[in-house]
Each structure stands twice: as structure tokens, then as C-alpha cells.
């Protein structure tokens, strides 16, 4: 598509004078003549005529990829035919020009077969009296003034008719960041470091920053963006939300930030450390800069990345329970975790450490305050901690008291001394042993056993405690579940015999630790693996992640919102409803007969009174307080039919954007999985079609330009449900 340009930037062009032959007496043979006029596309109203000369200025084409068009038309004011042999362009790209499309092209409405004969306008029966072509310019990445020369080869007196095209110099911005990596240094846990990022415009035109994207996998980073909010008030700190990008743009700012030519704009950045782990944040600035504007200018912010750094592995030495007079040892590695060498000048136990602990520093070699141990970046050296409890320590209530201590490592980093806690419990006998059994539908589920999705698992404690005077009084149940699961133990994870509903297909690893009344933890962590299967037929599962929901596992009663509400829709091909996505055919969503969703969880798709209702499609659960899952099941899907699948963000309940995931299973096997980009309240993700009877090609994805189809603010006028 040709961009609209204004005529004020065109050089005024005048018609080429008709060239006539003959300057001596006598009869001179007629010769063909050439007349050329030019037109530009202006104001979206089509081609407009301007007089032409042989120097043409390219219009206001600012950004890489912008197009400009100029139409050249050739006529013959002579008395005999004019022969056009060729139209050719000469041009050279600038440094930095890239792409598959040439900068300059000669474009014809219909490709001609040269030579082309142009007859005089008043010649009876002339085949062609006007020959036209378009000269198209596509702006490249390079910053020079592009130019080209058009040659019209013909048999007139001017056998090589030339038109020169030149680009007008643009007052473009030039976007830079100083520094490209903002290093906030080593930030000690519990402290804060601040810095300033300078956004520079070293070009001649205004820099307009229209959007800021920001993310960080760790908490603690924040920055200030100097635009006025949409309510007209200045916006305070933005906190980096997580591993996914958040955006500041037109919805947030009343107007974009403008940095005039040869000036700068400051962005204060800070990091409050909750640990000494290396931390990074990422910023991307989108602007009208012709070089970085399309992809954005990327900047990183670092903390605890550069400088000397020392870590201990492990960070805490826990010996657990040890029978008295038994020696236990554990190695500790000192690791140089920065990008500069770190010096170690001392390793010792604190004065308040239990005498039952001892250090063996032989592995570190000889070093002292005057002759430090030097570790290069990434280097590590180890020593040994010994624990020999000679007696059982008890308090006034006769409860066992643990032995504690601290290793102090003097070093050249900001964490000096580096403190490494030590603890252990001396006991007179063995520690308790954790064990449990899982039941479902009255049958034991063995370790590695299978159950169907949405099965309720019952847990029975079988732990025991051989310690004299002991007895188990505490339980700690945990599990590793499939990604996206929000399933929890009921009534709590500290209940002796809880139950658990496995709502997602996948592997669940359940664990149990127990504690006796002396305060001892079990020697072991009991584990059992359960495979949760989708079952026979077609199973479609929807889960979602809402970054602003602090606890997606909580469950709330009516009148209180605890999470976001996203809905699964699976639609029969017979469905008919409004065409909200404007593709020319009914969407099918919210059809009260053929859409299986929360309002219609048990549709009748096969009219057969003898058919067991379990063989009809059904939605097993409608989750309204965050994470899901919502499950569609169809034991006997109709052969050859595919069912449209959608995820609708019914109500964010104030928790903001969410990221849905759809999985599809056939006869228990996972055949498809996809996570959509960020969705906002009332968005509809038209994911595609589930072909439940075709295991070779189970899912047909819907895409636009390679991206999932997200319909904004999807409200079906045929569905008038209003929640009470």
C-alpha cells in the first residue's frame, strides 16, 4: 500500500518541451517526439497530475518500510509512432539498508513486452497513445539520502530521457541509552540501591517514546516513568512484575514522552534486595527512531552481578537428628559468585556456637589476614563441618533443644562476614519414620498407580516413632503437580488424614514428613507417585495463570472474589450464534444447544434416548476463582467431526491479565498443548478445532499472521445472562 504524502514537498515540475527536428532548408522527415508527465498519490484521493521536470523530490517517507509512489506517463506529440525500448533504474543502497524488497522499483499495471509503440494522440486507429509506469520507493534502514535515476530509452531525439529522484533529508531522532547496562552494583540483603538511566536523543528530530515494556524474573526492581497518567496525575514507581513483559503505553499515559533533539530524559531505577542472588531486569523502549523503533531499544538493569561475591553451598548446614556419640560430617563449599576475584581472610565458628561443632579447614589450604585465600570468578574450595553430640540437650520442660552455631567467613565482598548457620539435634534413639497409603474409590492406589482425572484421593498416615518418650503429633503433606494445577489438600496440608481431588491430567508426586512430640522431624520424606489419566475418548482441559493473583489455590464462597474466572467453550459444528469476530459466519459460542460451557454443561449433541448420558459431552467443573482447570469430556465423539474450542475471560474480578493454556487428550494421551498470549477481561481466544476422532491430526490451530486469535471485548448479544 502506498502511503499518503503531501504535495508541498514536491519540487515544482514543468512539462518537457516538445522537441522538433529540422534546422535546415528543404523537407525533413517526421520524427517521433516524447512528452513525459508525472503524478503522485496525494491525500488518498488517487493520482493527481503535476507538471514534470527531470528532478523529482521524494516525499515525506520517514520510517523504514514506508512507501512512496510516483507515476510516469509517456505520450507522443509527434506525427509518427514513438518506440519505447526500456525503462530502467540506477540506484545504490545506503549502509544499513536491508530487506527483500528493492529500495526502488519500476511497477507496471500489466507487464509490457518491450519495445512498446506509442502512437500520436490524433492518429486514427492508434493502438497505444499513452504508456505509464509507477516508480515505487520503499524506505530502507540506512540513514543517507537515497537517490535513483530513471532511464527511458526511446527512438526520439532524446534517446535517453532521464528523471532523477532524490530523498529529502529528514530531521530524524537517534535513540541511545546511557548506560546500555545499568549496573546497581552489589546490593546487600535488606538494603536498596538506586541509579539513573539516561535516554538520549542525538538526532535532529523529536524522539517520541510511545511504549515501555518491562519485566524481571525476580522481585525488588522498580523505576519511575515521567509521563502523566491517563487521569492527568504523575505516575509513581512501576514494579517489575515477573518473567512476562508488562507495558506502559497509551492506556496508561495521557501522552507519550517526547525527548527533543540533542537532549536526554532520565529514568530513576532502584533495587531492594531480598537476597544476595544475582538479579536482572529488562526494559524495552518503542519510539519513532527509524533504526530501533520497530523492535525497540533494549536496556538491562543488574544487581548483585558485578564485583566480588562469595556464597556458601549449602547456605545452611543442617545435620538433622544425630544419635549421641555419633560423628556426622558435612562439606561446605565457598564459591566466588561475582565477576571479580574475592579474598578470604578468615573462617571460624562464632563464639556462641555449640561446642559439639568443629571445623576442618584443611581443604582451604594455608591462608591468613595478611595472606588471603583468593578465589577467581567461578572458583570454589571446600572445608568440612563436624558434629558430635555428646548428650541430649533439653530445656526446663524436658523438651529437646537443638545445637546451633554460625560459621563466620571474613572476605572482601559486601557480605562480610558471610554467615553460615549450623544446627543439629542430639537424640538418644532413632527419629520417627514417615509412611502413608493412598485410597481411591475404596481401593489402594500403589506407588506409580493410575487414577482417572477428578478422582478423590484419601491419604492414610502409617508413620511410626521408635524414639523413647516420642509419639507423632505433626504432619506436613506436600505435592508436585502438573504445571498449572491449583489443587490442594483438604481440609489442610497439616491434617493427619487429608483428601485431595486431582483435577488435572498428569503426574502428581505426594510427600509426607512427620514430627514427634519431642520436636524431632522424621528421618525420611515418604513419597508416592500417582499418574492421573484423562480417561477414554476426548478430554479438553483449560487452565490459566493470573500473575496478580497472590494465591490461585484459595476458594471463596458467594459474594467474595478470590481469583479470576475464565471459561472453556467447546462448540459442535451445528452451532449458530452471532458473528462477533466478523469473519462472515456464526461463531457458535454461547449457543445454548451446541456450545458446551458453564451455562450449558450437559448438552445433548446426539438425539438418541437409548444413549447413556455419560456418553454425551459434558463439562466436569466450572472454576470461578482462579487457575482452573475446566474439563470437557466426550467419551464417544462423533466420527469425522471437529469441535471449535475457545477460552473466554468472563470476569477478571479485579486481578488483571491472565495467560490461558489448553491441553487436549485422546484416550488418555496428551496430543496437544498451547498457551496463549496475555488476555484481558472479556477477551475470547479462538484456539481452533479439536478433531477428537483423528489422533494423527487432533487439533487445527486458528492463527492470524502466525499469532493466536484473540478477540477483544467479546460480548455475544444473544447471551443475556446477568449474574445475581
Image (tube, grey):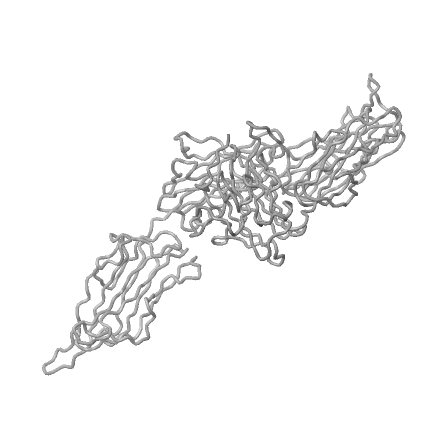
Q: Answer whether residue 345 is visible to the viewer in this image.
A: no
Count of marks, rendered view:
0
Instruction: Give the residue at the far top of this rendering.
Output: 396
Image coordinates of residue 514 in percent, x first then y, are 79, 31
Query: Image check: 514 left or right of 234?
Result: right
Instruction: Give the residue at the far bottom of this rendering.
Output: 26
Query: Image check: 58 left or right of 174?
Result: left
Image coordinates of residue 525 in percent, x first then y, are 79, 36
Quadrant (top left/top right/bottom left/bottom right) for the N terminus: bottom left
Query: Image check: 266 left or right of 371?
Result: left
Image coordinates of residue 360 in percent, x first then y, are 82, 36
Q: Answer whether residue 275 is visible to the viewer in this image.
A: yes
Q: Quadrant of residue 350?
A: top right
Image coordinates of residue 661 in percent, x first then y, are 58, 45
Closer to us: 552 or 14:
552
Instruction: Give the residue at the far front of this rendering.
Output: 609
Closer to us: 197 or 549:
549
Query: Image check: 40 left or right of 660?
Result: left
Amino acid at each position: 500500500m502506498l502511503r499518503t504524502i503531501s504535495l508541498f514537498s514536491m519540487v515544482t515540475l514543468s512539462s518537457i518541451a516538445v522537441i522538433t527536428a529540422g534546422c535546415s532548408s528543404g523537407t525533413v522527415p517526421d520524427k517521433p517526439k516524447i512528452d513525459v508527465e508525472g503524478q503522485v498519490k496525494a491525500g488518498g484521493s488517487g493520482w493527481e497530475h503535476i507538471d514534470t521536470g527531470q528532478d523529482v523530490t521524494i516525499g515525506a517517507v520517514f520510517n523504514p518500510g514506508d512507501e512512496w509512489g510516483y507515476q510516469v506517463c509517456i505520450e507522443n506529440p509527434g506525427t509518427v509512432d514513438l518506440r519505447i525500448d526500456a525503462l530502467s533504474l540506477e540506484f545504490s543502497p545506503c549502509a544499513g539498508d536491508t530487506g527483500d524488497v528493492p529500495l526502488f522499483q519500476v511497477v507496471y499495471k500489466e507487464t509490457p513486452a518491450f519495445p512498446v509503440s506509442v502512437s500520436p494522440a490524433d492518429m486514427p486507429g492508434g493502438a497505444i497513445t499513452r504508456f505509464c509506469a509507477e516508480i515505487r520507493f520503499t524506505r530502507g534502514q540506512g540513514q543517507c539520502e537515497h537517490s535513483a535515476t530513471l532511464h527511458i530509452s526511446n527512438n526520439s531525439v532524446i534517446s535517453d530521457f532521464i528523471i532523477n529522484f532524490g530523498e529529502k533529508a529528514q530531521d530524524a531522532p537517534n535513540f541511545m541509552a546511557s548506560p546500555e547496562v545499568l549496573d546497581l552494583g552489589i546490593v546487600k540483603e535488606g538494603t536498596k540501591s538506586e541509579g539513573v538511566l539516561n535516554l538520549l536523543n542525538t538526532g535532529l528530530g523529536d524522539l517520541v517514546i510511545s511504549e515501555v515494556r518491562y519485566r524481571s524474573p525476580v522481585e525488588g526492581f522498580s523505576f519511575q516513568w515521567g509521563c502523566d497518567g491517563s487521569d492527568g496525575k504523575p505516575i509513581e514507581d512501576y514494579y517489575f512484575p515477573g518473567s512476562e513483559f508488562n507495558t506502559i503505553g497509551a492506556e496508561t499515559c495521557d501522552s507519550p514522552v517526547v525527548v527533543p533533539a540533542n537532549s536526554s530524559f532520565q529514568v530513576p531505577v532502584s533495587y531492594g534486595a531480598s537476597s544476595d542472588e544475582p538479579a536482572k531486569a529488562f526494559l524495552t523502549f518503542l519510539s519513532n527512531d527509524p533504526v530501533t523503533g520497530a523492535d525497540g531499544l533494549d536496556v538491562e538493569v543488574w544487581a548483585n552481578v558485578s564485583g566480588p561475591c562469595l556464597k556458601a553451598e549449602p547456605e545452611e548446614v543442617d545435620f538433622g537428628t544425630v544419635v549421641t556419640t555419633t560423628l556426622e560430617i558435612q562439606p561446605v563449599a565457598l564459591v566466588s559468585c561475582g565477576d571479580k576475584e574475592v579474598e578470604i581472610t578468615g573462617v571460624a565458628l562464632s563464639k556462641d556456637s555449640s561446642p559439639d561443632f568443629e571445623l576442618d579447614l584443611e581443604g582451604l589450604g594455608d591462608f591468613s589476614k595478611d595472606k588471603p585465600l583468593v578465589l577467581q570468578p567461578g572458583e570454589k574450595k571446600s572445608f568440612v563441618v563436624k558434629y558430635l553430640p555428646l548428650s541430649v540437650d533439653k530445656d526446663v520442660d524436658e523438651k529437646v533443644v537443638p545445637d546451633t552455631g554460625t560459621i563466620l567467613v571474613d572476605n572482601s565482598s559486601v557480605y562480610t562476614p558471610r554467615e553460615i548457620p549450623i544446627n543439629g539435634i542430639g537424640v538418644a534413639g532413632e527419629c520417627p519414620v514417615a509412611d502413608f497409603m493412598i485410597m481411591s474409590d475404596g481401593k489402594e492406589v500403589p506407588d506409580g498407580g493410575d487414577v482417572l482425572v477428578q478422582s478423590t484421593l484419601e491419604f492414610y498416615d502409617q508413620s511410626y516413632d521408635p524414639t523413647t518418650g516420642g509419639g507423632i503429633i505433626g504432619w506436613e503433606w506436600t505435592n508436585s503437580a502438573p504445571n498449572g494445577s491449583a489443587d490442594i489438600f483438604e481440609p489442610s496440608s497439616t491434617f493427619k488424614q487429608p483428601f485431595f481431588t486431582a483435577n488435572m491430567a498428569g503426574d502428581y508426586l505426594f510427600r509426607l514428613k512427620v514430627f514427634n512430640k519431642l520436636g524431632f522431624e522424621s528421618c525420611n520424606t515418604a513419597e508416592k507417585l500417582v499418574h492421573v489419566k484423562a480417561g477414554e475418548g476426548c478430554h479438553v482441559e483449560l487452565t490459566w495463570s493470573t500473575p496478580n493473583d497472590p494465591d490461585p489455590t484459595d476458594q471463596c464462597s458467594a459474594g467474595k472474589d478470590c481469583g479470576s474466572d475464565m471459561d472453556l467453550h467447546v462448540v459442535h459444528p451445528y452451532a449458530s450464534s452471532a458473528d462477533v469476530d466478523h469473519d462472515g459466519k456464526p461463531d457458535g459460542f454461547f449457543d445454548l444447544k451446541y456450545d458446551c460451557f458453564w451455562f450449558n454443561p450437559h448438552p445433548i449433541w446426539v438425539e438418541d434416548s437409548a444413549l447413556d448420558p455419560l456418553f454425551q459431552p459434558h463439562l466436569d467443573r466450572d472454576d470461578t476463582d482462579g487457575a482452573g482447570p475446566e474439563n470437557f469430556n466426550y467419551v464417544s465423539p462423533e466420527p469425522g467431526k471437529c469441535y471449535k474450542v475457545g477460552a473466554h475471560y468472563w470476569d477478571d474480578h479485579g486481578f488483571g491479565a491472565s495467560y490461558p493454556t489448553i491441553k487436549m487428550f485422546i484416550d488418555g494421551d496428551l496430543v496437544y498443548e498451547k498457551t496463549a498470549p496475555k488476555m484481558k477481561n472479556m477477551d475470547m481466544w479462538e484456539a481452533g478445532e479439536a478433531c477428537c476422532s483423528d489422533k494423527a491430526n487432533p487439533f487445527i490451530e486458528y492463527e492470524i499472521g502466525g499469532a493466536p486469535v484473540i478477540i477483544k471485548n467479546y460480548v455475544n448479544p444473544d447471551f443475556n445472562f446477568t449474574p445475581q
